[in-house]
Amino acid sequence: MARIPTASQTLGPFFSYEFMRDDDPVIASAKAAGQHAVLKGRLLDKNGGPVREGLIEIWQADAEGRYPGHDPAADPEVRGFGRCLTDIDGNFAFQTVIPGASPSGGNSLQAQHFAVNVFASGLMKHVSTRIYAPDSDVPDAFLDGLSEDVQAMMRAEASNGADGKVVLEAVIRLGDERGTPSFDD
Amino acid sequence: MASDRIYNPLPEGSQPKYKTAGYRRTDTLAPGAQMPPLRTLTEHTGPAFQAPPPVEQNLVAGTEGLAIGQLMRLVIRVVDEDDRPQPGALIELWQANASGKYQHPVDQRVAPIDGNFRSWGRGLADENGEVVFLTIRPGAYPVPNTDGWWRPPHIHISAYGHSFVSRIVTQVYFPGDPLNDLDAILQGVPDAKARDRLILQPDPSVGLHEEALGFRFDMVLRGRAATPVEN
């Protein structure tokens, strides 16, 4: 029997802090292989103001492009998943490694990316988008088909951080036609 | 192979629009340019979770006694679009207490606090896709800075299923509550049948005899969790 997926409803402002564990924003442990990175940014509304109590979720491959739970060879130090509640200024931050190019599911590869789900009070259903690693040189049927402006909005900016880590920074801007592009379903 | 999974188009009106009448905040967050969904290995894989301790499925056993309110046992059954149970799905649930007050620093309203009630719970679906919570029927509460909007009694439910694309957060409501028809968030789902599916189903057989009401809810996740054949 075919079932129709349950309707979404907004997260609301009261997602319990009790759900959040200290290691929730840790996508990859310190022992993971690859270039370690801090993936951080801000969640903003139509007016450029911060969105607090938003829930940002990341799903990514390990440094070799393998997905945990799918590829038995995937790095056990990479959970692949992380989540973070935005603070009063809309900030979020994750500890991770830069993912490798991952299979599309067909015969091609995808440019290095983080899948992102965004939940917040006032979002009737979550927003799904991607953040691409900078300097990706992997041909990607989806990304390469976007305008340069849109590509630029979907790419993180890199800078050097402490302890040999790279800092990847991305702004997620909602409520604006020229804001962060996202996927419809 | 994961990419063989089929996703039926979502029926018109079965999901809310981002911009919802009567809910001003949606105007400031509705995303801009939207693109067709991607259906790659990225979307068809997702995190696995460990089972939380069962104590987290009992919200009413306080240190000083039982929580105040109408005790209820809630059986959530998690299935995919083929109605297949989804063992291992992580369910998180949060709600107000019997007076409509959340245990949360953002809830600044003056209302009775119940020290024996814990306003959140978490559980992993069993082999039948079921997660059971013992809780209370929450109270209604006013939405600040609105013209008399009260949220009907509702329970927030978050689910992580077979893949990242099956992720969902929703709210469930109580049958026959007069506030349901006035609620901008529930009414933000255009299709009446889709709204009806967010209403809990009374089922005395899952309650506790002379102790707790029984309710059921089917959580239907996006996608089909066909056992992937690795190539």
Image (spheres, grey):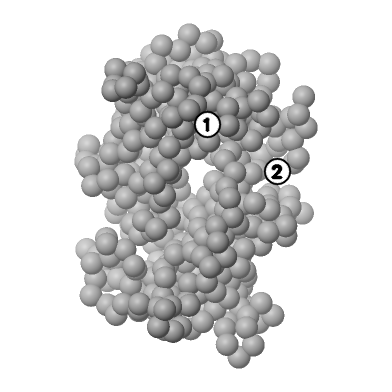
Coordinates of residue B153 in the picture (x, y in percent) = 43, 73
Q: Is residue B53 left or right of residue B227?
A: left
Residue bearing the label numbered 1: A78
Task: Using the rendered image of the protein, determine whether residue A136 is visible from the camera's viewpoint.
Answer: yes
Residue lying farthest bottom?
A: B210
Give the amino acid at mark 2.
Ala
Kindly identify which numbered label has been placed on residue B225.
Answer: 2
Few, some or many C-alpha atoms within 10 Å of disc 2 (few <14, some 14-19, many ≥20)? many
Residue lying farthest front?
A: A31
Please state which of residues A110 and B57 is positioned toward the viewer in this rendering.
Answer: B57
Tell me: residue B37, above or below residue B152. Answer: above
Q: Quadrant of the C terminus of chain A?
A: top right
Q: Quadrant of residue B6?
A: top right
Residue at 54 percent of width and 78 percent of height: B72
How many marks the image carries: the answer is 2
Q: Quadrant of the N terminus of chain A?
A: bottom right
Q: Alpha carbon of mark 1 to alpha carbon of mark 2: how far?
A: 23 Å
Few, some or many C-alpha atoms within 10 Å of disc 1 (few <14, some 14-19, many ≥20)? many
Tell me: residue A6, above or below residue A103. Answer: below
Q: Is residue A30 left or right of residue A14?
A: right
Nearer to us: label 1 or label 2: 1
Kindly identify which numbered label has been placed on residue B160.
Answer: none
* Helix, strand or loop for disc 1: loop
Coordinates of residue B89 in the picture (x, y in percent) = 61, 52
Give the amino acid at mark 1.
Val
